[in-house]
Image: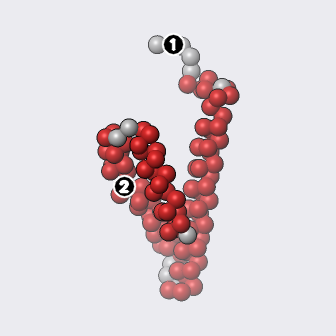
Amino acid sequence: MSGSSQFTLLGQRRFAPFFATQFLGALNDNIFRNGLVILITFQGVLVAGMDHTQLANVAAGLFILPFFLFSATAGQLADKYELPVNDVWTGQVRIPATEIGR
């Protein structure tokens, strides 16, 4: 095993697009999650007169729920099929799912 650190990858130029994509994806998820929490909290308070702290927790739970429900199945599919097949299938499902979610 070599003595180099895993952090040497940060200095390599060929990994810059990967790191930028990961960063922007995480940023997008966090902005979306916070916007969803704010929307559900304020609308719930105005419409239903519910407590804002409970609504914030429910909104965060609703955002996490799909990851919790589908992560095991996604892992099994990732192990079963080759990476190019998974990439094509994910790309074909992602765009319609995003449009439905809007």
Inspect this view and state whether residue 32 appears. Answer: yes
Quick check: 70 above or below 14?
A: below
Q: Amino acid at mark 2?
A: Phe
Question: Which secondary structure lies at badge 1?
Answer: loop
Quick check: 58 above or below 1?
A: below
Question: Which secondary structure lies at badge 2?
Answer: helix
Quick check: 36 above or below 74?
A: below
67 vs 3, left or right, is: left
- What residue sits 46% from the left and 47% below the top? 88
Q: Position of residue 35 (x, y in %)?
A: 60, 66
Q: CA distance from mark 2 to mark 1?
A: 37 Å
Of residues 35 and 101, the one nearer the viewer is 101
Q: Position of residue 57 (x, y in %)?
A: 48, 67
Inspect this view and state whether residue 37 appears. Answer: no
- Residue bearing the label numbered 2: 70
- What residue sits 53% from the left and 66% below the top? 99
Mark 2 surroundings within 10 Å by alpha-carbon count, few (fewer than 14), some (14 through 19), many (20 or more):
few
Q: How many marks?
A: 2
- What residue sits 51% from the left and 68% below the top? 101
| Rendering quarter of residue 79 | top left
- What residue sits 42% from the left and 38% below the top? 83
- Residue bearing the label numbered 1: 2
Q: Are marks 2 and 1 in contact (CB under 8 Å)?
A: no
Mark closer to the chain start, 2 or 1: 1
Q: Which image quarter is the C terminus in?
A: bottom right
Mark 1 surroundings within 10 Å by alpha-carbon count, few (fewer than 14), some (14 through 19), many (20 or more):
few
Q: Position of residue 65 (x, y in %)?
A: 41, 61
Q: Amino acid at mark 1?
A: Ser
Q: Nearer the viewer, mark 2 or mark 1?
A: 2
Q: Position of residue 14 (x, y in %)?
A: 64, 29
